Structures are given as structure tokens and as C-alpha cells.
Amino acid sequence: MIRDAHESGAELDVGGEPFEHTYVEKGFYFKPTVVGNVDPESEIAQRELFAPVALIMQYDTVDEAIQIANGTRYGLGASVFGPDQEQCMQVAKELECGMVSINDFGVFYLNQDLPFGGAKASGYGRFGGPEGLRSLTNPKVIVVDRWGWLIQTSIPKALDYPIESAVRSWRFHLLPCMCATNVHPAARCIRTYQKPHWQSMRM
């Protein structure tokens, strides 16, 4: 990818080749590399490299820089550098990633009390911090009548199907209303209708 980027017009002044380790002859090592004037749409700019490779891409406005940063399918960690702390914070909020350092790099790795994780194709979920502990739990939901002393959910009588009477089948249509707080009024009452029984139907 580095060679392709260089052949497509990117600048390569530092690194860009394997590193010969003094003690490990058969290791896979690569020299720290800086690739300049990179096209944001190129393959190297669209990959999550996990390598000692830094890419430099030009931009004219802060909004364009944010668009370039969010222009890939990945979003693990990021850094924002600038003299204006408030502007850096605003840019950090608009980045589509899991962690951001302002005027620093990777300090979120050092604090194990912070949730670690990414966004988009860089993964979902977190480890570390309260969010990481919650991922190791099994939540349980228990629903009870809020005003049990006044009204309780009753168990309906046994019903045999098919219902022989068409009149009874249409009357048996209203289920008990389910009341709850913070629920849209349209969802507080569920109605279900039973079609009339055809005499030709047999169970």
C-alpha cells in the first residue's frame, strides 16, 4: 500500500522499508514511516493499518478535516491538536470513534478506569471502566403491577379454538390494557381481533 500510494503521487521521505533487527533475523519489522500528501480516498487512507505509519492529508477547513477523519469505515481512537481548547473539544465530539485525546496521543490507553473500544468497523462494546464491567453481567427484567393494591393483571379464562360463535369471536377482542410510565399513549392498550369462525373450519 505504501508503494502504491507513492506511485500515485504521495510523498515518502521517511521509512517505507523493512527494518533489519540486530538480534532477530527472521522477524517482521518495519521502519517508522511518514507518508505525505495522501489522497483521502486511496487504499492506504481507507485501511486500519496498525503499523508505524503516519499519513499526512491536506485540508482547507476544520469541517473538511472532520469529514476526512470520518471518511473511513473505522473509528478506534483519535487525537486532536490545536491551540484552542474549546474548538478541539468540539472537533473531538464530532469524530466517529470510541476514544479521543486532545493535544496528546493514546493517553486513554493508560487509564484502565476508562472504557476502551471503538466505533463502526473498529468494533462494538467496551472493556475497562463501569461499561466494561456491565458487559460481564446478565441483566434481568422483572415487571410487576405498579398499583397492586388497586388493580392486578388477571389470567384470562381458558378458551377453546375455534370459537363456534361468530358473535363471540368478535366480542373476544380486547386484551387487558398494559399501563406503564414513559410509554407512548398509543402503546398503552393493545387490541387484537379474532376473525369470525367459518363453519367449514375443523380442528
Image: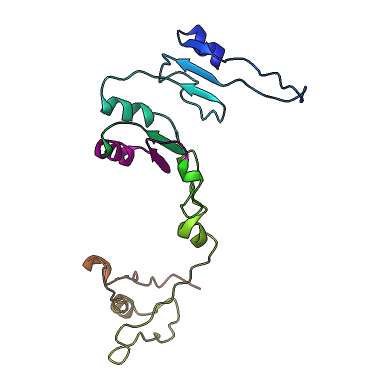
Residue 15 locus on image (x, y percent): 57, 15
Q: Is 137 contained in the magenta span? A: no
Single out the residue that lies furthest toward the bottom: 149
Residue 150 locus on image (x, y percent): 27, 91
Query: Would residue 44 be found to the left or right of residue 88 on screen?
Result: right
Residue at 57%, 27% in the rendered image? 51
Single out the residue that lies furthest toward the left: 185
Please determine whether, in this image, residue 145 is positioned above or below residue 101.
below
Magenta residues, start to end: 86-106
Query: Would residue 40 be found to the left or right of residue 178 on screen?
Result: right
Please determine whether, in this image, residue 128 is positioned above or below residue 54.
below
Quadrant of res 31: top right
* Between 196 and 12, the one nearer to me in the picture: 12
Q: Is 104 contained in the magenta span? A: yes
Residue at 54%, 19% in the rendered image? 33
* Between 137 and 31, the one nearer to me in the picture: 31
Please determine whether, in this image, residue 43 is positioned above or below residue 119.
above
* Between 101 and 83, the one nearer to me in the picture: 83
User: Residue 175: in sight, yes or no?
Assistant: yes
Please determine whether, in this image, residue 164 is positioned above or below residue 77.
below
Residue at 50%, 57% in the rendered image? 132
Residue at 53%, 65% in the rendered image? 137
Q: How many marks?
A: 0
